[in-house]
Image (cartoon, helix red, strand yellow):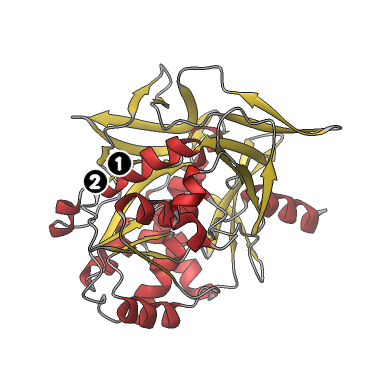
Amino acid sequence: MDPHTITQSEFWQSAASFLLENASCHPLVDIPIPSIAFATSGSSSTPKRIVLAKKSLLLSAAAVNQHLRVTQKSAWGLVLPWWHVGGFAVPTRAYAAQCRFHQGPIRWDADACYDWLSAANITHLSVVPTQVFDLVQLGKPCPSPLQAMVVGGGRLETSLGQRARDLGWPVLASYGMTEAGSQIATQDIDELTNPYSPDSLSILPIWQVALNDQGIIKISGDALFHGYLHTTNNGLNYQKRDEISYTTKDRGVIIAGKLSMECRADEIVKILGELVNPQEIERELSESGLPQQRFAVIAIADERKGHRLIFVHENLPLTEITAAIASYHQLAAGYARIEEMMAIEVFPRSDLGKIRRAELIAHYLQAMS
């Protein structure tokens, strides 16, 4: 499938269903409603396939377009893999808005992307934090046509987000997932005049968002996924979603109707009886100047302490690491100290650039065995 196919009426009016996986498209049968299935594993969970009705994907696209003030004069640009829901959503939004759509460089390259953005007069873009980092590293001002740059697939930290805005890049923090077909909550465009913050996201009107007793986010709405595909001896079997709402693995808070993300509930560990969030430590270290997505803090099971924290990095300069960790340790509780460092040539990553933490932990354990 070519992503331009997704901008055509024939694709959306067809009753056909497809599975998108590993840059390929496979027809599906025995799905009760025209749908698209996406393979997803996030950064730590086991692979799964989520089925979304075509009408739900269009509903999500329309809501995002409205939130980002997309018109027929706008132009959506694609720099994400089209077979992931975040990339697929881009030509879907162009179809929903009946506006221009352009695909960027097939292989990610910040310089090539920058030139393309200007030449194609792109007004709206979806990216991941790694791409923001690469564009900011160019040190060039944002091309003037770009009006909104939605950042998903991970948290864009405050310092990097502000550096981007200082160069004119209209970065907007967002929260979404495959199960929702795209965005659930996104910063308002009016926020671009304020200092950047990854918090206080506006919940799109198609979603009802609540928290359970543990502060875990629950979502419901007509754009919610339709079901699952399970691999069996007989091939792929479809299972309809039974629950009205979907309980995520994310912890957050809702204040004055806006959503702020805290962490993934399944990434919190106990050390000496105290709850510790390794990704919160990463945020503190990134604020000290370490480049996002070039390091990770992983928690390794420890018989005495419960867990211990290991700093893993992609061959960053030792002087930078030492200074950042020393600064962090000055204020960190004793149980939350980093005990060890390890360098890796290249991190295991998903197509969207997410660090595969389970593989990173497995790599560390293998190296230590």
* Pointer 2 with pointer 1, Cβ within 8 A: yes
Can you give x and y, in whole percent of width and height, for residue 67 in the image?
24, 46
| Quadrant (top left, top right, bottom left, bottom right) of the N terminus | bottom right
The answer to whether residue 153 shows anywhere in this view is no
Instruction: Check disc 1 and report the residue beneath it.
Output: 63
Picture layout, residue 80 above or below residue 15: below
Cα separation between marks 2 and 1: 5 Å
Residue under label 2, please give it.
Answer: 66
Residue at image coords 58%, 56%: 355
Foreground residue among 307 and 253: 253
Query: What is the number of the mark on residue 214?
Result: none
Q: Nearer the viewer, residue 345 or 259?
A: 259
Instruction: Identify the element where label 1 is drawn.
Output: helix
What residue type is disc 2 on? Gln
Q: Position of residue 32 (x, y in %)?
A: 60, 27
Q: Secondary structure at mark 2?
A: helix
In the image shown, does 301 or 97 lie closer to the viewer?
97
- Residue pictured at 66% horizontal, 38% vertical: 48
Quadrant housing residue 261? top left
Q: Which residue occupies 48% across, 24% down?
A: 246
Amino acid beneath label 1: Ala
